[in-house]
Image (cartoon, rainbow, N blue to C red):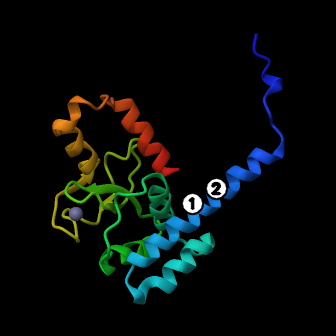
Amino acid sequence: MIHTDSVDMSGTNDNRSLANFNDGWANACERLMAAVAPSQRRRVQGLLSNPSLGGRGIRMWVQNLMRAEDVNLPSSVPETLVQVYFDDAEAIPLHDCEQCGVPLPVRPGLAADHSEPERVYFERCPICGGRAGLYAFWSRSADGSAAQSEPEINDSERRQRVRRIAR
Ligand SMILES: [Zn+2]
């Protein structure tokens, strides 16, 4: 029998994972800042360090970067894209580009699965012109030849993925 109370619940591990989280967060912030236009960096920095100013969508973008180190970040992010997060405090990066995978902002609607945004800011990717939509990049990747070796992800898992992102 496994005694759950034998699991180490001392603060040491928590502190270490918090430190790892902070490192990952700082690293992802730095990567995003490097890609943001110099004229917008100060404001983005403000939103990242002070949630009371808004910028929920930008912080979610950073969280995405923490989860996926090598994707979703172009070398330079168009000002029009970042401006959406400045102008719309509700905007969050739920759509993506099917070509380059950059996350794109929408204002979410009331549907729990975010399938019907209240407002879509980019029908086409402002970076590469690719089609944009919910899971556009993800579903295109899954349709490719790699799909045979990838485990299939069903609808409920997709919804969980969205919920995680939207949290
Ligand atoms: Zn693109």
Estimate the x, y position of residue 62 in percent, counting from the top left. 48, 63
Ligand 1 placement by image quarter: bottom left
Instruction: Name the amino acid, label 1.
Output: Gly
Q: Which residue is drawn at 82% across and 25% down?
A: 6
Q: In this view, does 14 lie above or below 50?
A: above
Q: Label 2 neighbourhood size at 10 Å, few (<14), some (14-19), many (20+)?
A: few
Mark 2–mark 1 distance (CA, rounded to whole Å):
6 Å
Q: Which residue is drawn at 83% across and 25% down?
A: 5
Numbered disc 1: secondary structure: helix
Estimate the x, y position of residue 160 in percent, counting from the top left. 44, 37
Numbered disc 2: secondary structure: helix
Answer left or right for 5 relative to 28: right
**Circle 1 is placed at which residue position?**
24
Q: Label 1 neighbourhood size at 10 Å, few (<14), some (14-19), many (20+)?
A: some
For the N terminus, give its image quadrant: top right
Relative depth, front residue between 122 and 128: 128
Q: Residue at x 25, y 50 (%)?
A: 137
Which of the 4 quarters of the picture holds residue 99?
Answer: bottom left
Estimate the x, y position of residue 21 in percent, counting from the top left. 62, 56
Tag 2–tag 1 contact (CB < 8 Å): yes
Q: Which numbered marker is on residue 41? A: none
**Circle 2 is placed at which residue position?**
20
Which of the 4 quarters of the picture holds residue 118?
Answer: bottom left
Estimate the x, y position of residue 149 in percent, counting from the top left. 25, 30
Answer left or right for 166 relative to 22: left
Q: Residue at x 18, y 64 (%)?
A: 124
Whether ligand 1 has any atom under 8 Å from the Cβ at mark 1 is answered as no
Instruction: Name the amino acid, label 2.
Output: Asn
- Furthest residue in direction top, as rendered: 1
Count of picture labels = 2
